[in-house]
Amino acid sequence: MVAKTFQGLEDVLAEELRGLGAKNVEPGRRMVSFEGTLSTLYKANMCCRTALRILKPIYKFTAADPDSLYEMIKEYDWSSVLSLDKTFAIDTVSNSEEFTHSRYVTYRVKDGIVDWFKDRFGPDSRPRVRLQDADVMINVHIAGERVTVSLDSSGESLHKRGYRVAQTEAPINEVLAAGIILKSGWRGDCPLVDPMCGSGTFLIEAALIAAGISPSSRGPISTPTFSTRSTMTILRNVRLTIKSMAATSLPKPWP
């Protein structure tokens, strides 16, 4: 699995993932790769303060041009993550001389997925693209000729904690604010003062850290891979664990 973050916060995110029981944690550039169970994936979505998204790679290959990309996409069994009644969206990140336009990559990947269904179910049978609130979020990352297709288990960016109903003109990103606090070494054991608090993001994130409150409780979005009866049981257990952790980590009064 892969957790995305801002450059400079990789070490903090890696430590968070280790604390959740993730294995083989390896920081990279604006990301941290790790291994774990489905429960680990849920915990990462709900507990990591410095993660922007949690991706689950499902398909890796090499492609030299858009045509070969399209053909490789058509070779994957898309029924394992999509069905005709589901909607999907694609987010593309490309760092490649061969693929210089990420929007064109998105179109070719979309064509490959749609044509896979048309070839098997008929010319009018296909899942629909939905740019907002899609059932399945697909992430495509290209580095040179290496292509990684992942499911985005987070849906919306994890910086959207849910506590902000309005914002100032230039609020600091919640993930960045939490990362700066954690990199400073502050864990709630002494007072924290923000004399230019603006919308209060630093103070809110600091309060969540001090009280041991999870930054998110929504868990991964609904997809065929993540929404089964067993995964709902895992999600309930993770939420109970997080609630118990928060109850036992309330801040002590400062002297």
Image (tube, rainbow, N blue to C red):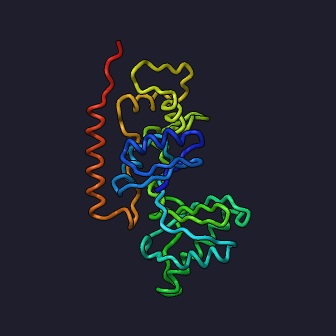
**What's the residue at 54%, 75% (across, down)?**
113
In screen coordinates, is 67 left or right of 13? right
Which residue is painted at 51% across and 72% down in the image?
128
Where on the picture, by quarter, is residue 213? top left
Could you say where residue 33 lies in the image, as x and y percent from the top left? Answer: 49, 52
Please determine whether, in this image, residue 123 is positioned above or below residue 130.
below
Q: On the rendered image, what quadrant is the C terminus found in?
A: top left
Where is residue 171 drawn, in percent x and y? Answer: 57, 34
Residue 170 vs residue 146, the one in the foreground: 146
- Determine whether 84 is above or below 8 in the image: below
Q: 18 or 226: which is nearer to us? A: 18
Q: Residue furthest front?
A: 24
> In the image, 61: left or right of 158?
right
Q: Is residue 24 placed above or below 101 in the rendered structure?
A: above
Above/below status of 199 relative to 42: above
Residue 42 screen position, x and y as percent:
37, 52
Q: Is residue 209 left or right of residue 167?
A: left
- For the point 57% across and 22% down, the residue is 196
229 or 48: which is nearer to us?
A: 48
Query: Residue 8 appears at what percent x and percent y?
Result: 58, 39
